[in-house]
Image (cartoon, rainbow, N blue to C red):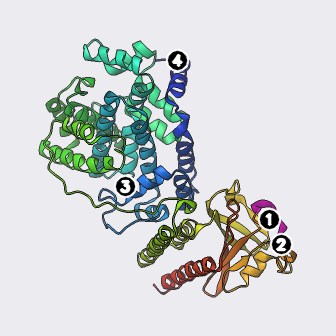
Amino acid sequence: MASNSTSSQILERIITAGDLPVMTSTLREITRLEKNSASSAADLAQVILKDLALTTKVLKLANSVYYNWSQKEITTVSRAVVVLGFDTVMNLAVGVSVLDYFYRNSQSRHLRAHLFVTMFAAIFAKTLSEKFDFENTEEIFILTLLNNLGLLMTAFALPEEFEEIRKLVISGEKGRNSAAKQVLGTTFAELDTELIRFWGFPARIISALKSIHQGSPSMIISKEDQLRTIVACSLELFYSLHVREAFWYPRNTAQVLKRYFPPLGISEGKVRALILKTMMEGKEFLDVLQMEFSPGEFQSLIDEFVIEIPEQEPTPQVKLGTLPWWEMSEGERAKFRENSLKDIDNSILENAPLNDILTIAMEGIQKGVGFDRIILFIIDPSNNQLTARAGFGSPLPENLSDLTIPLDEKGQDHFSMALNERGPLLISSVKRPPFRENVNWDAFNILRGASFCLVPLSFGGKTVGLFYVDRVQSHKPIEAKEVALLQQYKTLIEASYQIGKKR
């Protein structure tokens, strides 16, 4: 076993050579949400929306047949979370971040071949796990991906050392982990663990990966045994199917089928059907991530799998409004608003929880109308204050969930006045009359917005909170037509409560 210092030293070399911090920020934010049971759809959407490329790819995958069986168009990240589930979108974002990092940053065809094998194996593992009633099959996709991470990162960041390891494995002198140990002083498995600790993955994932590193058990008794077998056989199977990289495992495909699948109760015919299904779904999945590939290279990497793949009908391209509002034309913003309102309508018809509808609305308002940020506040009557619940955009106050704004005891500040309004209240400038006499300085000192709009929300005849929207960075004035759009969202949200109550 390599010492912690040895694997840490290799990790430092990989970080330096591979510019690893580039994707660390997004991954750490996502894994932080995973550790926090109180994380919401808005929290997850907010992290994804900070990365335009990630947003585009997550939405495109969310609209694929692979994920969206209903084929109702999903145009907002918030809606994706509602339709697909928090865990699915979170794991999808992790997978896309890791895979896209390697695609964009490496010209090595050996690395790309390993990446192809790993991703198809991860899809196969997810598909196979569905046969055994695992609660979170998306997590098995991630675990399979992470189980090959040390090898992928070495191939990417330390190509000379990787070539030495490769030659040792090809010659038959060493297995992949023992060859890595000889060249690097640590194994690929130990690097896997170091890397996911570096990214801040929760202890549950680290523990599961350590169990998987033990390999397939001699007997399948528990759910953990099934998981270890599924991940091990998926990687070994797809390596054996890939002409160029098959040498990384000593067994051929027939031996893999014989060793792993009878104990799982899966017939050879069923395995072949699952392989075909995986290849078709994987091609669609990779369509989102293959932008760096030339068509010839992409097809040749697919062709290196020794299996007959039937032709698949091309998936229609979905046009998505994913640009920040300041980069969107007025026509694009109008289309985004239209789509987000449709998302709200569909969520109401599906009897989605009010919190999900509010989240979709916030994303639609922030991006579709075009504000720097939007924050949802709920009234806390016992303390005569507003408490922040969620937000979109930038900059959001730190520790948003702990943010409270005291209301004026006489009800004469802007926030108290808005709560008594039937429609949105536009404050064009707190520095000028007639608005400067009613400034809530507690709110101003936190939010720093001199111009903003407050949109009260009433359910069952009772005002329960409000939306705060502003352009604190761009300083573009809020126009009357935009206030009218806010009223449109307000009306639809409040109607959703009445419809849900009647049901």
Give the SS element for disc 4.
helix
The structure residue drawn at horizontal position 58% and vertical position 61%, both measured from the top left corner, is 326
The prevailing secondary structure element of the residues shown in magenta is helix
Question: Measured along the vertical axis of the image, is residue 477 above or below residue 229?
Answer: below
- Dot 4 corresponds to which residue? 6
Mark 3 and mark 2: span between their CA atoms? 45 Å
Give the SS element for disc 3.
helix
What is the three-letter code of the residue carrying label 2?
Answer: Val
Front residue of 152/36: it is 152
Mark 4 and mark 2: span between their CA atoms? 59 Å
- Dot 3 corresponds to which residue? 61
Query: Is mark 2 in CB contact (under 8 Å) with mark 1?
Result: yes
| Comes first in the chain, label 3 or label 4 | 4
The crowd level at tag 4 (other Cα within 10 Å; few <14, some 14-19, many 20+) is: some
Disc number at residue 439? Answer: 2
Disc nearest the viewer among 4 and 2: 2
- Dot 1 corresponds to which residue? 444
Mark 1 and mark 3: span between their CA atoms? 40 Å
Front residue of 84/267: it is 84
Decide if residue 383 is on the left or right side of residue 198. Answer: right
Question: Measured along the vertical axis of the image, is residue 464 above or below residue 447?
Answer: below
**441 inside magenta stretch:** yes
Disc number at residue 44? Answer: none
- The region drawn magenta spans 439-448
Disc nearest the viewer among 4 and 1: 1
| Comes first in the chain, label 2 or label 1 | 2
Instruction: Give the percent coordinates (x, y) of residue 313.
Output: 19, 57
Query: Is mark 3 in CB contact (under 8 Å) with mark 4?
Result: no
The structure residue drawn at horizontal position 36% and vertical position 39%, both measured from the top left corner, is 144
